[in-house]
Amino acid sequence: MSSLHRVFAGQGLAAQLARRANRARDRKAYARAAKFYSLALTLHPERTDLRVQLGHMLKEEGHYPDAEAAHRLALAQAPEDGDIHLQLGHLLKLTGRAEEAITAYRNAERLLPDGRAAAAELVALGAAPTTEASPLGGDRSPYRPPL
C-alpha cells in the first residue's frame, strides 16, 4: 500500500482527497488542488462536481486545453447541468473563443433556474440574452430588447 493510501485508510479516501483539494483551492494552491481532485476522480469518476473543480484549478494554472477537457467531460456526464455550461463559457471567453462562449452561455441561460449570470455574460460579449433572465432580473419570458 502506498504511503498516500495509508494516510487515508479507513477515512473515506475520496472524501479526504476532496477536502484536501478544497483546502488547497481556498489557499490558491491550484496545482496542488488539481492533484487532489484528480486523485479523487480516480476513485469516483462519476463525480462531475470534482471534475468541474479540477477544470477550475487547471484554468487558474493556465492549462486551458486540460481545463476545457475536464469541463467537456463533465458536460458529457451531465449535459443538463447549466452551471457546467456557464463554467465552460467562462473558459472559452477567457481563451478568446467568443462564439463558442456565446453558445455555452446560451445553454447555461436556458438550463439554469436563474439565468442572470449567463445573460450578463452574453451582454458582455455583445450578444442579446434569449430570455428576460437579464442581469437586472425579470421573468423567464422571451427576451424583448428595449425600444
Image (spheres, rainbow, N blue to C red):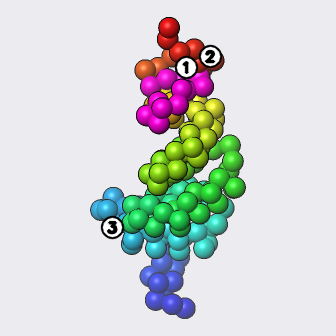
Examine the image and state in which quarter residue 120 appears. top left
Q: Tell me the kind of residue under disc 2.
A: Ser
Q: Which residues are magenta?
A: 123-135
Numbered tag placed on residue 132 in the rendering = 1
Label 2 and label 1: CA atoms lie apart by 6 Å
Relative to 90, say whether 112 is above or below.
above
Q: Tell me the kind of residue under disc 3.
A: Ala
Question: Which residue occupies the foreground of this view, 61 or 50?
Answer: 61
SS class, disc 2: loop
Disc 2 residue crowd, few under 14, some 14–19, many 20+, Cα 10 Å: few
Question: Which residue occupies the foreground of this view, 7 or 40?
Answer: 40
Q: Tell me the kind of residue under disc 1.
A: Glu
Q: Earlier in the sequence, mark 1 or mark 3?
A: 3
Q: Can you identify the residue that label 2 sits on?
A: 141
**Which residue occupies the extreme bottom position in the image?**
1
Q: Earlier in the sequence, mark 2 or mark 3?
A: 3
Q: Position of residue 115 (x, y in %)?
A: 54, 30
